[in-house]
Image: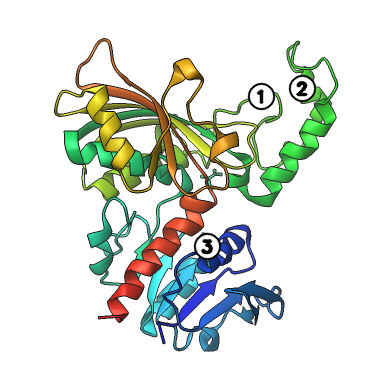
Amino acid sequence: RGPALAVVGATGGAGAVLLQILSQHADVWGEIRLIASPRSAGRKLVVRGEETEVLPLGEEALDGADVAVFLVPEQVAAQWAPVAAAKGAVVVDTSAAFRMDPDVPLVVPEVNPHAVRLRPRGIVASPHCVTLALIVAVGALHAEYGLSGLVVSTYQAVSGAGRAGVETLRAQLSLVAGTELGTGPGDVRRAVGEDTGPFAAPVALNVVPWSGEPADGGWSSEELGLRAETRKVLGLPRLAVAATCVRVPVVTTHSVSVHATFENEVEVARAHEILATAPGVVLLDDPAAGEFPTPADAVGTDPAWVGRVRRSPDDPYALDLFVCGDNLRKGSALNAAQIAELAAGEFSG
Ligand code: 2RA
């Protein structure tokens, strides 16, 4: 029998994706225990083809878990991840609660798998969905060329803001469908009304240059988080990162335009070879044939889709590229599942 896995947050959006992934991946687990808030407990969900009752989050539910994946809000993880770790579980947390804790490794299995073993608190953190959209491709290029700087703009799907984000977009799209809106200042805003849901402005027929909370210097928490997480995963504490996070009218899949500078001169042909062979990356780069990644094609898949690879005409040490990644799969549940599978390997000796 394999190690016992506890899934905390099994009834949420990312939880549903994780259960699907656990049913698709090679089965390395013994018991899989589903846990959620007391109000969601008692429901029955199917995992590995078996109907399983959801247990209420508490001390008892966590007893005996060898690995515990947390897909819950930050404050819930902050309270319960240490409890699970104290009981001997390897905890994989997808929230921001521990990402910057020096005693908690921040792991992307394709980039820094070794880091999973050094976990003084018994907790391993998974980066947030925007970092995960770009880090697998950028990490592969870093391994060859040595990354020295990043300037990125994100194009974030509304499901990054949960069900409320998706419902807001769909409601706003229904209000603007079949109209002539988007042609005069404030016309879309007046049509969708004051309530723009989790977003600071209308997202239908619009883009919103903001995601996260206000932080220092006019940056958003997500922009500074992307910078800090990329530095930590790549082990580059002084890496220059300038990020602009933008919300776009896409349901699921984040996209990122990347300007990356390196210590060594780059060649597009070699960058193509690296990306075409990098684990977790699919290269789709033939613009003349209309071939490049788009969210509509990448959604529901596991890889980071990379295209538009160009060497800067002004700097032989710089590459520009465009990457798409499903924010609910690799951006959350898949990365957590891959880290959990790394930890499960420790139990098989
Ligand atoms: C967002 N990255 O897209 C944030 C959290 N998932 O809203």
Q: CA distance from mark 1 to mark 2?
A: 8 Å
In the figure, residue 167 lies in which quadrant? Answer: top right
Mark 2: amino acid: Val
Residue, far front: 289
Q: Residue at x 65, y 40 (%)?
A: 251
- Determine if residue 215 is in view: no
In front: label 3 or label 2: 3
Residue in view at x 67 percent, y 30 percent: 201
Ligand 1 visible in quadrant: top right
Disc 3 element: helix
Q: Which residue is mark 3?
A: 21
- State the separation of the CA atoms marked 3 and 1: 33 Å
Query: Of the numbered discs in the image, which one, if any, rests on residue 188?
Result: 2
**In x, y percent, where is residue 304?**
43, 42
Residue type, label 1 = Asn
Above or below, comparing residue 266 to residue 302 in the picture: above
